[in-house]
């Protein structure tokens, strides 16, 4: 029987839908915990179902994780690969307001579209575990976790100046402000004092920092988190204000430079400003403070502005020299960091130097560089000078001594500062989880009893933001007014909602028992599946989702809810797919590629193949239509190759092709495991070039080729597999084993010489290029010894036998 007629061409349209339905009908990817198999929990960052639909960047992440999931399943692992929707948030709400459609309705539509697109890409998720953060049965547990944090003292109410986006009409977390602008809409953020629910993430600063060490994450993501947490070890120093009982505390990381302090400078918002400002300076100070405010009436000192300031008229006394130092106010001192006050050391700090130069303050060098004669400001380490009995002491050592002496005088202490701030957790918007708290005039803040969760969002008609700092929920009086669970008196619900990051701060837990009604997840399911083994997603979440998720996991760990301290031991960040013009894809540039169009024209397998072939997962690459055509051509060739050899009966393969096959298996397997899918695709392409030259191939070779193809182009692999007479899905077939003995037997020994004398020997695959062999030869210790400090004049290579370095001793 001919399974592919001579004329039949590869037609993804007819094949793909059929297999997508097959996988659903047969629950091919439904995961069940099992004691016999090793588990593998592979997770994607779930999407925000926007109105734009899936883009090719999503497709890259989801194809890669799907490929891993299919690979590990074929390797015999018990794989959990779920998907869901991170659906609360501003864009949906904004579109809903514009279109006059309820956000819940819009969310439903968007999810339907995303789900359909994902299915059309052949993504093998366990859809029975689908979650949706806006589903009351899901956010019931988001609210429950909030109450845990509340009980732990990690959620607290405070009226503080926060970042307010005038366009989104809501407060933002620090993590949501990028260069002074709203992360969502790009509008300049203003400062606005408001009552807030805050989460005490700072209590976990040290553990969030320490935990990073053990994580298999990209270094740049770890660095971003480390810098965001921003731990600084230093000292606080107390300066007495002259002729007053007041004091100024400063935070410094360079207490060794204290003899170089020529002024003290405080933030314009510092409470001492009023006390120390003299009559003579009062007008100038008032004017400065007014002029340094931003448009919203707040102050955003971390912008890189000119350093300006004003003299208060007051002085402090230097704790060692008793010298009078003027107290200044300046915009480069943040009230929100350290103590809001700094000792100005212009000789050794860039900002102080600029400031002192502008205002003609004195500059005194107290640290000397040990090698070069450095220009000022000199910010490095060195030995002290002009510092009394510490002259000549190395600066690091001097820090210890000086702090000790300050402690003795009760004028200072060792302290540690963090850049990390508590998480501003309230939003003044409708489309988010209600915060499950009730305000009672008698009892204060009372948590909603667990059995009354979820507190569902009321279905209302007017959900436009009010802009007054109150959520639209505040106007829904029959929802707001409740009886106090504690005293049964009149109470009012908290009307702020949670930020869009809440639902994603624990969702990996829910996938393990998505329908469980007694808690976030069933204990046995957590033990069977957690932690996540591989997490794929975007790098833009480095200090948002990825930090919040770690924080909640640690809090839940402390509360005994979960058993791991870290949620994602291995995280890999996707490289962007740029537009064909090498620019970031964006609607305004008109360079967006829609995956639906590619699937319609070439098929999902081609899109998958292409996205995996363009480069390693973590690399950013531009879209390339030629590459898409190349991927399709390769699949056509595979189709025709299998058609040609469909009747293969022979059990034994030609030696050479067998060897090449095992090399291919090895390269494809390694490529997948290392997220270098491109090398896997290249290996298949190279193998096909050779195999196509053969008149006949063995049946097992055809089978093995299809298995290797299956994670990349699953529809085609299933189709050909079934046409070859296999009854079960290829997704359940066993991944081919590499015959290592065969590969080793085929390896050749290359003798390595230096100036004709044998210095070593290496084993390599036949036909390895000379450059690669040279590299390996140089790594042989005995060879390296003879190459050290000499010039290699030339290298003679006799293929597969001998490599000789001709060297001349270095002069
Ligand atoms: C004196 C000094 C001398 C400093 C010197 C540096 C070099 P990191 O590492 O970021 O923690 N500083 C302290 N509080 C500040 C605030 N609220 N606003 C602006 N600057 C502040 O930086 C710590 C240093 O930043 C501190 O050490 C202080 O300047 C400044 F040669 O104190 B230093
Ligand atoms: Zn009460």
Image (cartoon, rainbow, N blue to C red):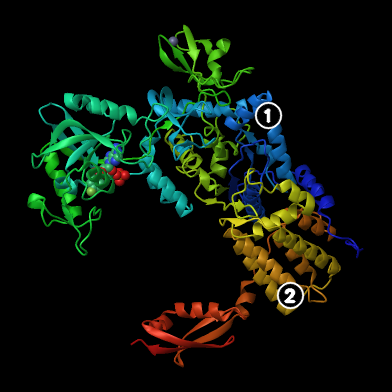
Q: Nearer the viewer, residue 64 or 419?
A: 419
Label at residue 614: none
Residue 227, image x, y percentages: 39, 46
Q: What kind of element bears circle 1?
A: helix
Mark 1 burial class by Cα count in 10 Å: few <14, some 14-19, many 20+: many
* Looking at the image, residue 302 lies above or below residue 604: above
Quick one: label 2 or label 1, which is nearer the N terminus? 1
- Callout 2 secondary element: helix
Pick the front one: 541 or 72: 541
The answer to whether 102 is drawn above or below residue 112 in the figure is above
Question: Which quarter of the rendered image does ligand 2 occupy?
Answer: top left
User: Which residue sits at x=37%, y=31%?
Assistant: 299
Judged by depth in the image, the label closer to the viewer, 2 or 1, is: 1
Q: Along the line of sight, which residue is nearer the eye, 262 or 755?
A: 262
Quarter in which the N terminus is drawn = bottom right
User: How far from the left and from the top, in percent, is residue 642?
Assistant: 81, 65
| Residue placed furthest toward the bottom | 756
Which quadrant would the C terminus be assigned to in this image? bottom left
Disc 2 to disc 1, C-alpha distance: 52 Å
Number of disc labels: 2
x, y percent for residue 264? 20, 38
Horizontal side of residue 372 vs 785, given as left or right: left
Residue 188, how many percent across, how many down? 47, 34
Q: Is residue 338 visible?
A: no
Q: Tell which of 509 and 297 is nearer to you.
A: 297
Residue on which the image places disc 2: 690
Q: Badge 1 is on which residue?
A: 106
Q: Residues within 10 Å of mark 2 (few under 14, many from 20)?
A: few
Side of 392 where 160 appears, left or right: right
Q: Residue at x 72, y 75 (%)?
A: 657
State left or right for residue 644 relative to residue 789: right
The answer to whether residue 589 is left or right of residue 385 is right
């Amino acid at each position: 029987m001919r399974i592919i007629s001579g004329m039949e061409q590869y037609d993804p349209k007819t094949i793909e839908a059929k297999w997508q339905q097959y996988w659903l009908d047969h629950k091919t990817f439904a995961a069940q915990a099992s004691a016999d198999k090793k588990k593998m929990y592979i997770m994607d960052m779930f999407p925000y179902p926007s109105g734009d639909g899936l883009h090719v960047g999503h497709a890259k992440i989801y194809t890669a994780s799907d490929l891993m999931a299919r690979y590990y399943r074929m390797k015999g692992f018990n794989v959990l690969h779920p998907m869901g929707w991170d659906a609360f948030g501003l864009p949906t709400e904004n579109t809903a307001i514009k279109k006059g459609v309820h956000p819940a309705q819009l969310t439903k539509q968007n999810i339907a579209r995303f789900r359909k697109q994902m299915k059309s890409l052949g993504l093998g998720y366990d859809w029975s575990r689908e979650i949706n953060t806006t589903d009351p049965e899901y956010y019931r547990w988001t609210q429950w976790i909030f109450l845990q944090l509340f009980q732990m003292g990690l959620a607290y109410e405070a009226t503080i100046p926060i970042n307010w986006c005038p366009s989104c009409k809501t407060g933002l977390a620090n993590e949501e402000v990028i260069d002074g602008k709203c992360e969502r809409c790009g509008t300049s953020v203003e400062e606005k004092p408001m009552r807030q629910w805050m989460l005490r993430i700072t209590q976990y600063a040290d553990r969030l920092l320490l935990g990073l060490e053990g994580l298999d994450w990209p270094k740049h993501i770890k660095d971003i988190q480390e810098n965001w947490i921003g731990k600084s070890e230093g000292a606080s120093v107390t300066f007495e204000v002259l002729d007053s009982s007041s004091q100024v505390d400063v935070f410094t990381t360079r207490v060794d430079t204290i003899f170089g302090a020529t002024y003290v400078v405080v933030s314009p918002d510092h409470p001492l400003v009023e006390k120390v400002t003299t009559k003579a300076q009062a007008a100038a100070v008032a004017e400065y403070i007014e002029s340094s405010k931003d448009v919203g009436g707040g102050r955003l000192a971390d912008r890189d502005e000119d350093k300006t300031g004003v003299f208060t008229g007051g002085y402090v006394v230097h704790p060692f020299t008793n010298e009078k130092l003027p107290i200044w106010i300046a915009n480069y001192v943040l009230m929100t960091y350290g103590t809001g006050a700094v000792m100005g050391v212009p000789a050794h700090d860039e900002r102080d130097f600029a400031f002192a130069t502008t205002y003609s303050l004195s500059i005194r060098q107290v640290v000397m560089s040990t090698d070069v004669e450095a220009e000022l400001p000199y910010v490095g380490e060195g030995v002290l000078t002009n510092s009394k009995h510490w002259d000549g002491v190395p600066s690091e050592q001097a820090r210890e001594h000086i702090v000790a002496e300050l402690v003795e005088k009760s004028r200072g202490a060792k302290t540690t500062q963090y850049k990390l701030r508590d998480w501003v957790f309230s939003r003044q918007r409708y489309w988010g989880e209600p915060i499950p708290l009730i305000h009672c005039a008698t009892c204060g803040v009372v948590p909603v009893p667990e059995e009354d969760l979820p507190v569902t969002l009321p279905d209302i008609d007017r959900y436009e933001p009010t802009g007054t700092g109150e959520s639209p929920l505040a106007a829904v009086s029959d929802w707001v007014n409740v009886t106090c669970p504690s005293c049964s008196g009149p109470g009012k619900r908290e009307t702020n909602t949670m930020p869009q990051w809440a639902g994603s701060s624990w969702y990996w837990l829910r996938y393990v028992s998505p329908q469980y009604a007694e808690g976030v997840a069933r204990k046995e399911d957590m033990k069977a599946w957690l932690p996540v083994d591989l997490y794929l997603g975007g790098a833009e979440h480095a200090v948002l989702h990825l930090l919040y998720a770690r924080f909640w996991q640690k809090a839940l760990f402390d509360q005994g809810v979960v058993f791991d301290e870290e949620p994602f031991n291995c995280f890999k960040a996707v490289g962007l797919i740029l537009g064909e013009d090498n620019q970031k894809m964006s609607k305004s540039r008109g360079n967006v590629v829609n995956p639906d169009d590619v699937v319609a024209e070439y098929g999902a397998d081609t899109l998958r193949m292409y996205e995996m072939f363009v480069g390693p997962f973590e690399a950013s690459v531009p879209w390339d239509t030629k590459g898409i055509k190349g991927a399709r051509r390769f699949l056509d060739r595979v189709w025709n190759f299998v058609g040609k050899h469909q009747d293969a009966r022979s059990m034994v393969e030609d030696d050479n092709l067998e060897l090449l096959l095992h090399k291919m298996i090895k390269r494809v397997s390694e490529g997948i495991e290392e997220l270098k899918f491109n090398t896997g695709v290249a290996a298949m392409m190279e193998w096909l070039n050779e195999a196509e030259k053969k008149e006949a191939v063995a049946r097992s070779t055809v089978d093995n080729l299809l298995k290797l193809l299956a994670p990349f182009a699953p529809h085609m692999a299933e189709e050909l597999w079934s046409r070859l007479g296999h009854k079960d899905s290829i997704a359940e077939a066993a991944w081919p084993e590499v015959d290592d003995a065969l590969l080793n037997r085929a390896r050749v020994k290359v003798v390595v010489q230096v100036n004709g004398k044998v210095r070593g020997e290496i084993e390599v695959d036949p036909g390895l290029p000379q450059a690669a062999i040279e590299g390996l030869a140089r790594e042989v210790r005995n060879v390296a010894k003879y190459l050290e400090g000499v010039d290699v004049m030339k290298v003679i290579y006799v293929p597969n036998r001998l490599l000789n370095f001709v060297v001349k001793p270095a002069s």
